[in-house]
Image: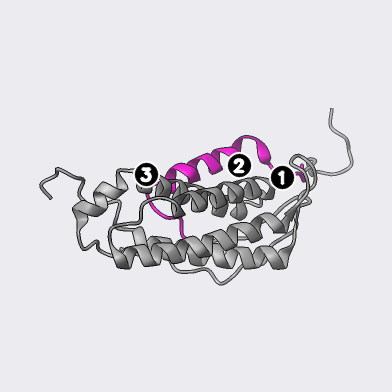
Amino acid sequence: MHGAGGNHRGVDRRIPVPALALAVLALASAAALVYFIWPGASARTAGTAAATPTESPLPPIVTAGLTPGNPAHVAAWNAGQGGAALAAIRSHLGTVLMAHSVGQFAQMRQECRSLAIDVKTASGRPPIPDVAIQNLYVKAQASLASGAAKCQASIKGKTGAAVHANKKLLGKAMTELNAGGKELSNATGKIRTSPRPGSNQ
């Protein structure tokens, strides 16, 4: 039986965490392995989480990526531990950006922690056998490591409770993560399409 206090149904003001947000995050993780998710819409927030400032969105990257000087050597690298580390970075960077865009800061902090681990792991893997690509890849790793550290430091509160973000610090984190993502795409965008060892391409 409905009350007579108005025509509006009660609106649940809590962040719609359950099915939709988690499904979006899962989809972003898979999509990041195919294309780098460009830093477009950011800072849509809800509930008790603090709104974050949005930096000027970077344009989508078209046909990004340096062309490997020796595609077969780079493809061999991509098939090994180096390529696995790169894939992990792409995946977690995608979920970091998606978590930020839907205001899921507890999830974002967790993904930033995973991204930081990925970058550290990648730095210890064999370098990409292409000097220009490797140099830009290292630059991207530095930007992502710094952004991931600021991301973690900016978000306070236990999972499941009110989570608060330091808007200024998180804004700096997003600037660095966006820059690192662009550098990563420019460095490694064409590695995905490099011919694999033994191919006739």
Query: Outermost residue toward the left?
Result: 200
**Residue type marked 3:** Gln
Question: Between disc 2 and disc 1, whose residue precedes?
Answer: 1
Crowd band around label 1 with a 10 angstrom C-alpha radius: few (<14), some (14–19), many (20+): some
Instruction: State whether residue 153 is above or below residue 32.
Output: below
Question: Between disc 3 and disc 2, whose residue precedes?
Answer: 2
Name the one closer to the observer, 150 or 164: 150
Judged left or right of residue 183, residue 189 is left
Judged left or right of residue 111, residue 60 is left
Res 182 seen here: no
Distance of mark 3 from mark 1, alpha carbons?
38 Å
Residue 7's x, y, as percent?
80, 43
Give the number of the disc on residue 81: 3
Residue 165's x, y, as percent?
73, 57
Residue 50's x, y, as percent?
75, 58
Query: In this figure, which residue is indicated by the disc labeled 1?
Result: 15
**Residue type marked 2:** Ala
What range of the chain is rendered magenta?
Answer: 12-40
> Where, by quadrant of the figure, is residue 146 drawn?
bottom right
Q: Tell me what residue is drawn at x 13 percent, y 50 percent.
A: 201
Determine whether label 2 and label 1 are within 8 Å by CB. yes
Give the number of the disc on residue 21: 2
Judged left or right of residue 129, residue 87 is right
Instruction: State whether residue 8 is above or below residue 97.
Output: above
Query: So how many labels did they put on this image?
Result: 3
**Residue type marked 1:** Ile
